[in-house]
Structure formats: structure tokens, C-alpha cells
């Protein structure tokens, strides 16, 4: 079976800085894979390359959506990458803070609608049906993420952990094949992290999705991921199962090195 995501030797230079150096990674359908590494290792740059926010200096990013048509992502506009079936959340939450919780999800859902400008102006029965579908699906996703009781609230009024879950609901609204989560547990308390962990398993199992996450919470990474890639200074230094990774001397050194500098 073709991997959902297949990244071959991707490098990214920012002027003289090589932020990624020939990074090779793949994610299979139904997998939960983690990308870890010390601060500045290049993890977010890697997400930006695979979602085409950055065009890699070298290497190729291939994505296989549910229809099986393997597609090269390099050079595509980020909105086309979303339409193909890759959705992401951001390390720094990016909600429309002065819109309601429901509206935040509805906006994301619009990438799956067919209504053009004339349809919207004429308000034909098919447009009205589509609008109802957007509201229903958005509410259903809020319920899935345990946020439906806040649906009328402004996004900025939600507690921090709930804002992170709202970001995931927005990503789910685009019907992705691959969900990319950039530090989803950052700033959460242990209870919220535990809830999130169960939600991620539920999304993978019930929505038939592959998940790639960047995360610093090691207990979450170890209990959630089937496989882990470890990055340091833009290079992959290890990959394997949680037990292989936790006993890898290079990984222990990279993390102990970081602690020593903290
Ligand atoms: N747009 C940019 N221009 C120049 N340098 C950049 C840019 N984006 C990232 N970098 C640099 O690339 C390196 C990797 O940064 P990146 O944010 O990808 O690391 P990270 O592993 O995600 O770190 P963290 O865990 O702290 O989020 C850093 O040295 C960073 O300063």
C-alpha cells in the first residue's frame, strides 16, 4: 500500500542556515507517528515544507489522498494541499478569536463546499441545503471534541485547552486523510492532556485518519505513537517504536544535552 505521506530527502535552507538536512519520513494509513526533537531542531519547518507553506530547497513531498492518486506537493498552493486532504494545527493557536466557536469550524468547512458566488447570491435550494450541511457537520465536530456547549461563545473566551481542541475541530472540518498536529498538548494540564490523548486515538480509529504530531510531552508521545522520528539540528538521528527510541543512546544524548542547557 502507498504511504499517505512520503517525504524523500527534504532539505530547507534559510540563507546560510540549513534548517532541514535530507529528512526522509513516511506515514502509513492509520498510523500515529510522532516527530520529536529539541527546540530549534527543525520540526515546525518540516511541517511548513510538507504543507507547502515553504517550498523545500531540495527533496520531494508526496501525498496519497483517499482516492489513491499519489500527488507531488512541492510547489502547490497551501489551500490546494488542504483540499487534497492534509490539515494541520499550529504551535501558536490561530483561531478567529472574535468569531464564535461554531463559526470558526464553519469557515474551515467551506473548503469542501461547491457554492460559487452566483449560487451564494441567488440562495438556491441547493445552496441552502449546503449551508445547513455546514452548520450540522460543524456542530457535530464540536460535539466530537467536547466543545458543543460553547458553540455560541467567542473563541477568545474559551479556556486554553479548549482552544487547542477547537483548532483540531477546524482541521477535521476539512475532511483530511492526514492530520498534522503541532504541539497539541502545549500549555495543557495533565487532565486535559489525557483527554486529548483519547481524542487522538478516537479520531484515528473512527475517522480513518493518519496522524503526524510534533510534541514535547514525552509521556503523551510514548503512549500515543506507533512510531517516532527524532530530529536534531535539522537531521533525523533516529526512528523506531517508542521502546526503541527511549533506549537509543543518540536520543538520550540529544535530550540530556537540551536539559543541560536549560
Ligand atoms: N522563516 C525562517 N527564517 C529563518 N530561519 C528560520 C525560519 N523558520 C525557522 N528558522 C530557523 O530554523 C531552525 C528550526 O526552527 P523550527 O521552528 O523549525 O524548530 P522546531 O524544532 O520546530 O523548534 P520548537 O520545538 O522550538 O518549535 C531554527 O534555527 C530557526 O531559527
Image (cartoon, rainbow, N blue to C red):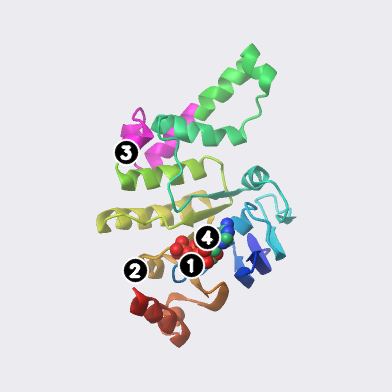
Question: What whole-number distance in Å separates the C-alpha atoms at marks 1 and 4?
Answer: 9 Å
Residue at screen point 29% across, 42% down: 159
What crowding class fits label 1: few (fewer than 14 Cα within 10 Å), some (14-19), or many (20 or more)?
A: few
Magenta stretch: residue 227 in it? no
Question: What whole-number distance in Å separates the C-alpha atoms at marks 2 and 3?
Answer: 26 Å
Kindly indicate the quadrant of the structure image that contains residue 245.
bottom left
**Mark linked to residue 219:** 2
Q: Which residues are magenta?
A: 135-158
Mark 1 sits on what residue? 40
Question: What whole-number distance in Å separates the C-alpha atoms at marks 4 and 3?
Answer: 25 Å
What crowding class fits label 2: few (fewer than 14 Cα within 10 Å), some (14-19), or many (20 or more)?
A: few
Mark 3 sits on what residue? 158
**Mark linked to residue 137:** none
The numbered mark, 1 or 2, whose residue comes first in the sequence reads 1
- On screen, residue 20 above or below 208: below
SS at circle 3: loop
Question: What whole-number distance in Å separates the C-alpha atoms at marks 1 and 2?
Answer: 21 Å
Residue at screen point 61% across, 35% down: 112
The numbered mark, 4 or 3, whose residue comes first in the sequence reads 4
**Where is residue 164 shown, x and y percent of the image?**
39, 47
Say if disc 1 is inside 8 Å of ligand 1: yes
**Mark 4 or 2, closer to the camera:** 4
Question: What whole-number distance in Å separates the C-alpha atoms at marks 3 and 1?
Answer: 29 Å
Amino acid at each position: 500500500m502507498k504511504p499517505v505521506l512520503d517525504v524523500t530527502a527534504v532539505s530547507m535552507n534559510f540563507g546560510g542556515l540549513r534548517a532541514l538536512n535530507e529528512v526522509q519520513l513516511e506515514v502509513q494509513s492509520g498510523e500515529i507517528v510522532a516527530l520529536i526533537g529539541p527546540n530549534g531542531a527543525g520540526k515546525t519547518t518540516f511541517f511548513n515544507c510538507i504543507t507547502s507553506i515553504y517550498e523545500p530547497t531540495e527533496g520531494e513531498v508526496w501525498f496519497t489522498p483517499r482516492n489513491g492518486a499519489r500527488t507531488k506537493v512541492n510547489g502547490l498552493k497551501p489551500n490546494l494541499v488542504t483540499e487534497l486532504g492534509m490539515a494541520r494545527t499550529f504551535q501558536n493557536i490561530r483561531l478567529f478569536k472574535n468569531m464564535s466557536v461554531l463559526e470558526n469550524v464553519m469557515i474551515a468547512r467551506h473548503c469542501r463546499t461547491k457554492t460559487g458566488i452566483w449560487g451564494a447570491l441567488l440562495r438556491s435550494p441547493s445552496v441552502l441545503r449546503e449551508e445547513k450541511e455546514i452548520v450540522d457537520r460543524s456542530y457535530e465536530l464540536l460535539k466530537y471534541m467536547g466543545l458543543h456547549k460553547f458553540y455560541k461563545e467567542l473563541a477568545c473566551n474559551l479556556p486554553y485547552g479548549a482552544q487547542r481542541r477547537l483548532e483540531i475541530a477546524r482541521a477535521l472540518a476539512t475532511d483530511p486523510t492526514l492530520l498534522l498536529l503541532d504541539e497539541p498538548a502545549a500549555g495543557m494540564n495533565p487532565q486535559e492532556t489525557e483527554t486529548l490523548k483519547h481524542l487522538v486515538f478516537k479520531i484515528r480509529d473512527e475517522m480513518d485518519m493518519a496522524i503526524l504530531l510534533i510534541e514535547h510531552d514525552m509521556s503523551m508521545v510514548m503512549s500515543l505513537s506507533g512510531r517516532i522520528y527524532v530530529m536534531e539540528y535539522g537531521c533525523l538521528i533516529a526512528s523506531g517504536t517508542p521502546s526503541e527510541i527511549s533506549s537509543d543512546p543518540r536520543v538520550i544524548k540529544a535530550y540530556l544535552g537540551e536539559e543541560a542547557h536549560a
